Image (tube, rainbow, N blue to C red):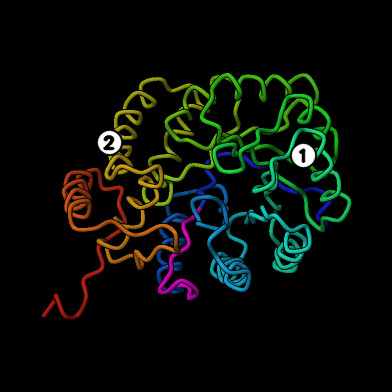
Amino acid sequence: MNPNPPAPHGIIPPIITPLITRDELDVSGLERILEHMVDGGVHGIFVLGTTGETSSLSHPLRHRMVTETARILDGRVPLYVGITETSMTECLELAETARELEAAAAVAAPPFYFPVDQPEVKYWYETLLDNLPLPLLLYNMPSCTKVSIAEETLVSLIHHESVIGFKDSSGDLGYMEMATRVAREHRPGWPVLVGPEHLLVESMKLGAAGGVTGGANIAPRLLVSLYEALANGDTEKVAIHEETLNQLGGLYKFGSHPSSYLKGLKCAFDMLGTCSGYMAEPLEPFREKERNEVARWLGSFEATGLLPERIISQESAS
């Protein structure tokens, strides 16, 4: 284990998993996405999170996603690997793959499916930490796990030297305020990061160290610039970037399901030619109505200059 792992900070995109079929990775698409994000100045990459459709992927495909991402990044930015699982064995096996590929840390939310209470959440993390070959970034994602990491559990875990930070995707600023206060009181400088990008500004005002923001998949330079403006106290730039961030948020509003944000991202990448828009079941890609809406959004957002370049196929070029 790296005795001095990098402190998570800045913008760390939770990357989508580009798929050709339910069990085949779109490797060339992955390369294009990662290069776009690295060129955008991101401070790390997070694979196998919620935006990566992880719970719908086979275990061999998860390992391949980590392997290919590590190969493409080649150490240019820290790699954070999601190991959230219902099985401790599978969790640790994926962590071992991440260790072998020199990932900066593992990321784990509480286990899901069984209804668990705080003693079991604490027991899960303590067992994980006793066996984990990497530092750990805690991950609060109650909309998916159906349990939140309570304050008393966070206070208990923050003192473990291998726990290097915390990502909160609850979407609750009151919870974010609690988490940043716990960090200040119990481990000053311990980084807390926010998930939903529309809360980045308010979260950093509370003391967050940055964001694990899905929109940085498609517009990394925007989120990095907003983070830098916030870190430098440049209120004028923050206001300008917030306007563009609101435009970006329009991509998540097509369709009528909670998964629309992810469908919007994958559909946009598909239309740009960046990668396949295939989604693992139970999610399905947008149909004609929503695709037309995404096409119109792309037409207006392209004026920002923040999107990946469109890939023109030989067929359309001729």
Mark 2 lies on residue: 247
User: Which amino acid lies under the numbered mark 2 shown in the image of this protein?
Assistant: Gln
Residue at 40% from the left image edge and 50% from the top image edge: 262
| Residue 7 spot, x, y in % from top left | 69, 42
**Residue 158: % across, % down:** 80, 33
Disc 1 secondary structure class: helix
Q: Which residue is at a point 50% across and 74% down the rendered structure image? A: 23
Residue 21 magenta-highlighted: yes
The C terminus: image quadrant: bottom left
| Earlier sequence position, callout 2 versus callout 1 | 1
Q: Position of residue 48 (x, y in %)?
A: 57, 57
Stretch of the chain drawn in magenta: 15-25
Q: Viewed as shown, does residue 225 lie left or right of 44?
A: left
Say which residue appears at 45% left-offset and 35% top-offset.
Answer: 197
Q: Specify the quadrant of the image occupied by residue 70.
A: bottom right
**Which is nearer the eye, 82 or 300?**
82
Q: Quadrant of the N terminus?
A: bottom right
Residue shown at 82%/55% (left/top)? 132
Q: Quadrant of residue 149?
A: top right
Distance of label 2 from label 1 (alpha carbons): 38 Å
Contact (Cβ within 8 Å) of mark 2 with mark 1: no
Label 2 residue SS: helix
> Disc 1 marks which residue?
121
160 is within the stretch colored magenta = no
**Which amino acid type is marked by label 1?**
Val
Task: Tell me: 149 left or right of 278.
Answer: right
Residue 34, image x and y in percent?
Answer: 47, 61
| In-image side of 38 versus 287 (left or right) | right
Furthest-left residue in this view = 318
